[in-house]
Image (cartoon, coloured by chain):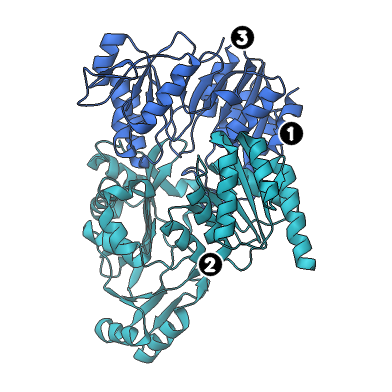
Chain colours: A blue, B cyan
């Protein structure tokens, strides 16, 4: 079992003919993901990587019955691509694109209210992977192994680092979800934690947060109300100064809000073990 | 991009918001010229941070000599790490009342929030903490913007009903900064009501989303080069690197924001202080590594560098060769510790060792090693 994605999920790729879209579609196929097509405006009717290409998402959904989409289009077009997918009835939208204007994402979030079937992951995220079954996005398969640990993270490479440590220790993962580094996000930690709670195959949980915003504090509040998962949290940016954006658009401490300390305290209060370095995560999870 | 006060005011004026007459000055002579045109002026340091008043960056000039002296004192002053490049000389206002209006992105609500308060002239964070009811809020629909009756409600909620008409009109104009300029935060604090009843922006802050720079090339061209911030950050920006100066003596390069932040944390845990944050993104291309090292080595405080690269599908041997080449091209003599993982990581480590670079098995071990090496360097 897993959350959100498995080997039966029919996936399309928006921007499939682009360099990134092509490369990662092949990686997704190599893992066994059921990619059924893609979109590229003006190239409808052609085939790419052996898959049918459509002009629009609506056309692709009609022809293939796809329920999930990975978005690899450039930032100026990405917000529209998310809304196009939602309007076409896609239920799982994964937006990898980095650098989408924040005001665009605020309008997207408002638009998604009219399409409650659509779950958005990202943007500016590595996507998600259910090891041994399927992935949408760019998480490398080689750092993962099938298993019982749910993982959810705001960071890409840090997820890979922790994923490979878990895999090496024999602690495979049910699903790994990268929710992204932007200030205005699709699914939050709480949304994903809720899904893991309801997934019988997931017994352990690793949360990788970072400074900025309060999605970690919200998730801690949720866990404090009762959780069956053995959980370890890690927060990066303990030494980050106030008012400086640390790479991710969302990784910024404003005044005394969004500090690593506040997030770690919230998790401790919820009974969650807090790892001080990523090396400690495996030991705390056992 | 955080605009300077005079830039923010130019943008507000373009939206139809009244601003006091003012002139930019870079020299004492220009300040005298501003004085002869405007009369008594406030001479204000132009830096993209708050608290310049307390730092001595604002002086009132009632004579031409005072204006000249104020400029001589303020230009070049260091305010929270920013060297003051120029001042804004602005006609002094006859203040009756001070109000606050602004907007920001509420991350939890994933929406913009308009804020109005009768308690102008104070730090709004402080007002929010001490008198939360003194701030009225409105979450406008992001597609159609705030409607007139919503704005009227906002103004009445703030207890400013006597100014309902002018304030409603002004906030509607201020909101245009979102659709027109992709502003993330705007603040007019204080919004001054003068003794003869005019409503006018006393100060202004405006932050434009860097992600939307492609939509607003004119702003970047007009204002992008004025700022004399941290020299290493400026250089890094020219080289398209994600770089933040931090003040310690150990240079840091990592791939991915989270990984890079956690590397800083490890260095501090090991007893060191990071000089910077530098995220070179995925792939760790040789050219990018060299650019990042070049910027870090510009800083004379740096005593050693730690590179932490997690390669998913990146080849470790190629990353190692890139690092060796970058070090040799830059004739780098300082201690360098590299922690890397990925495909062919053993071959990569071999290449590093052959070239006299310390590989660290884990990020934590690497952090301890660079702290140790830089300390040894200090003693010697």
Viewer-nearest of labels 1 and 3?
Answer: 1
Q: Do we see residue A70 in this rendering?
A: yes
- Can you tell which quarter of the image residue B364 is in? top right
Residue A21 as seen in the image, left or right of residue B341: left
User: Which residue is nearer to you in this view: A120 or A58?
Assistant: A58
The N terminus of chain A sits in image quarter? top right
Which residue: 30% across, 84% down? B35
For label 2, the SS is loop
Q: Quote the CA–CA distance across marks 2 and 1.
A: 36 Å
User: Which residue is nearer to you in this view: B46 or A161?
Assistant: A161
Q: Which mark is residue A200?
A: 3
Which residue: 47% across, 78% down? B76
Farthest residue in the front direction?
B354
Subunit that carries the residue with mark 1:
A
- Few, some or many residues within 10 Å of mark 1 (<14, 14–19, 20+): some
Task: Give the residue pinned by disc 1.
Answer: A280
- The spot of residue A105 in percent (x, y) is 36, 36
């Amino acid at each position: 079992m897993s959350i959100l994605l498995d080997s039966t999920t029919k996936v399309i790729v928006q921007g499939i003919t682009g360099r990134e879209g092509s490369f990662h579609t092949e990686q997704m196929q190599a893992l066994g993901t059921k990619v059924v097509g893609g979109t590229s405006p003006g190239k409808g009717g052609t085939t790419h990587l052996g898959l049918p290409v459509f002009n629009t998402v609506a056309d692709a959904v009609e022809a293939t019955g796809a329920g999930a989409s990975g978005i690899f289009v450039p930032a100026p077009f990405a917000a529209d691509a998310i809304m196009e997918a939602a309007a076409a009835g896609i239920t799982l939208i994964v937006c990898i694109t980095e650098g989408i204007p924040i005001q665009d994402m605020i309008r997207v979030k408002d638009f998604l209210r009219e399409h409650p079937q659509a779950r958005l992951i990202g943007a500016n995220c590595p996507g998600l992977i259910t090891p041994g079954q399927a992935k949408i996005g760019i998480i490398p398969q080689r750092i993962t192994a099938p298993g019982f640990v749910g993982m959810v993270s705001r960071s890409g490479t840090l997820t890979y680092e922790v994923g490979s440590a878990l895999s090496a220790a024999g602690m495979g993962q049910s699903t790994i979800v990268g929710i992204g580094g932007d200030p205005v996000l699709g699914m939050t930690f709480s949304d994903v934690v809720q899904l893991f709670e309801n997934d019988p195959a997931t017994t352990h949980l690793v949360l990788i947060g970072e400074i900025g915003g309060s999605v970690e504090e919200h998730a801690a509040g949720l866990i404090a109300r009762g959780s069956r998962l053995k959980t370890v949290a890690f927060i990066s940016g303990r030494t980050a100064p106030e008012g400086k954006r640390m790479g991710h658009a969302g990784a910024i401490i404003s005044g005394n809000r969004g500090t690593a300390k506040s997030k770690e305290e919230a998790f401790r209060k919820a009974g969650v073990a807090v790892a001080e370095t990523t090396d400690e995560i495996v030991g705390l999870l056992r | 991009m955080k605009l300077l006060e005079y830039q923010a005011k130019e943008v507000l004026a373009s939206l139809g918001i009244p601003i006091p007459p003012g002139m930019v000055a870079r020299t004492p002579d220009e300040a005298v010229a501003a004085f002869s045109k405007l009369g008594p002026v406030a001479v204000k340091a132009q830096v993209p941070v708050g608290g310049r008043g307390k730092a001595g960056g604002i002086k009132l000039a009632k004579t031409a000599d005072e204006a000249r002296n104020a400029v001589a004192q303020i230009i070049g002053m260091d305010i929270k790490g920013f060297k003051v490049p120029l001042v804004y000389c602005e006609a002094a206002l006859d203040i009756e009342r001070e109000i606050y209006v602004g907007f920001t992105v509420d991350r939890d609500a994933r929406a913009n929030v308009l804020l109005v308060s009768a308690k102008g002239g104070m730090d709004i964070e402080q007002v929010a903490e001490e008198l939360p009811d003194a701030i009225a809020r409105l979450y406008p629909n992001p597609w159609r913007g705030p409607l007139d009756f919503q704005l009227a409600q906002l103004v009445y909620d703030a207890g400013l009903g006597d100014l309902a008409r002018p304030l409603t009109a002004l906030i509607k104009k201020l909101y245009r900064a979102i659709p027109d300029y992709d502003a993330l935060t705007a603040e007019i604090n204080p919004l001054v009501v003068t003794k003869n009843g005019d409503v006018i922006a006393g100060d202004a802050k405006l932050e434009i989303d860097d992600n939307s720079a492609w939509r607003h090339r004119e702003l970047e061209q007009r204002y992008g080069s004025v700022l004399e911030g941290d020299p290493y950050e400026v250089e890094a920006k020219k080289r398209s690197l994600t770089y933040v100066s931090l003040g310690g003596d150990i240079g840091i390069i990592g791939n991915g924001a989270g990984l890079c932040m956690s590397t800083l944390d490890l260095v501090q845990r090991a007893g060191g202080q990071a000089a910077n944050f530098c995220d070179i993104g995925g792939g760790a291309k040789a050219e990018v590594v060299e650019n990042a090292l070049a910027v870090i080595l510009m800083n004379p405080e740096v005593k050693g560098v730690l590179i932490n690269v997690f390669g998913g599908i990146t080849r470790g041997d190629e990353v190692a060769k890139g690092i060796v080449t970058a070090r040799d091209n830059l004739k780098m003599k300082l201690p360098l510790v590299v922690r890397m993982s990925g495909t062919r990581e053993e071959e990569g480590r071999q290449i590093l060792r052959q070239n006299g670079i310390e590989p660290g098995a884990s990020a934590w071990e690497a952090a301890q090693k660079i702290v140790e090496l830089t300390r040894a360097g200090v003693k010697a």
